[in-house]
Amino acid sequence: ECIDDAIIACDSDGVLSYFNQAALDYHGLPKKSIKPDEWAKYYDLYEADGITTLSREQIPLFRALTGETVNNQEIVIKPKDLSKRVMLCSGRKLIDSNGNDLGAVVSITDITERKKLEEEETKRRVQVSKYNKTLTSLIRHPSFVNADLNGLLAELVKMLSDTLNVSRVSVWRLNIINTISNIECMELWDSKTKSYSQGVVLSSVDFPSYFDALITDRTLLFDDVYADERVKEFTQEYFPANGITSMLDAPFHFSGKIAGVLCLEHTGEKREWKVEEEAFVISAADIVSIVFEASQRKELETTLQRADKMDVLPMTTIICWESLLGMRICLKMKSLIIPG
């Protein structure tokens, strides 16, 4: 009676003869001396799909009674007033020392939590595969290959919105003037209006807590934006005006310093961000870092080429990065150097 597994037995006529306490708890019903034809209906027994009622011939105890050895048969029980459980059943026929048929017995192990974890891991692997496909699409996009920052940002914000089902995705450039910082929206995609926008500026004077966090944190996760001190200044106007309930931000960098931030703004019900979602957004921000750096170099090269007094020589630069999702990404580009 102290073991966690359920033990159920029947006599040679198929009448239930023994239920231990675990069996009673799982089913939420008392042992009832009924025939095998009634077991599935009375005890709510289903196949592994949780939908199809077990036939008499599929019930583990009946299989054991007919002489089969049952090993790890998966079934589902769905008691009317209790939670559904996924069970693993093993059983055999009972024969005494004289060869007399005594009936059959099965042991039943609750694997509900294990199955839940397995399903969650399968879903996680599917999501990670989906995220890697998105990253692959980004690095194969002509805007990435050609270091076209504006083109890449337009593609990236929409792609992240679609992949993560987030209403608003944007990229902001960080500007620092003396002791005052601001972030300027370079590209924002709103999936509800199906439109892009740019140009909004947010200042550290108005949002000091957020700017402090932006400088120090690798990512900024806000499952509930109204319950986090780091974004308290946004709760008066910005969040209510845009219907934002959860947010996930990841800075991007240039020359080892923060150059801006990739921002995902979720609307509707509050959202608890997953670890793989965070890793995906960090990887996307790293792609922005690569193209941002490459575009800055291109701008410098254009300036140098226009300066008649400057002699420049071509060279090839390769910028490489490995994402948290296990992808290695390299951007090969032509650069210029000034002879010393």
Image (cartoon, rainbow, N blue to C red):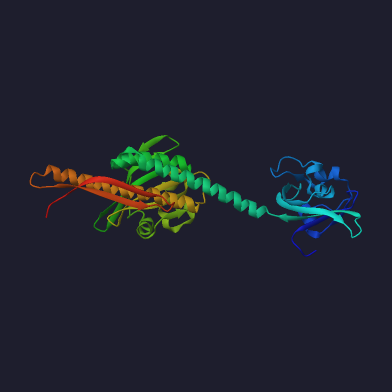
Residue at the top extreme? 194
Residue drawn 45% across and 50% down? 247
Quadrant of residue 162 in the image? top left
Can the viewer see residue 235 in this picture?
no
Residue 36 image point, x, y percent: 85, 45
Residue drawn 38% across and 44% down? 170
Q: Nearer the viewer, residue 175 or 25?
A: 25
Residue at the front extreme? 98
Say which quadrant the N terminus sits in. bottom right
Can the viewer see residue 75 in this picture?
yes
The vertical placement of 99 against 34, above or below, is below
Residue 281 image point, x, y percent: 42, 49
Asked if residue 83 lies left or right of residue 319, the reply is right
Say which quadrant the C terminus sits in. bottom left
Q: Nearer the viewer, residue 196 or 274?
A: 274
Asked if residue 78 lies left or right of residue 287, the reply is right
The vertical placement of 74 against 212, above or below, is above
Residue 150 image point, x, y percent: 30, 40
Residue 275 image point, x, y percent: 49, 54
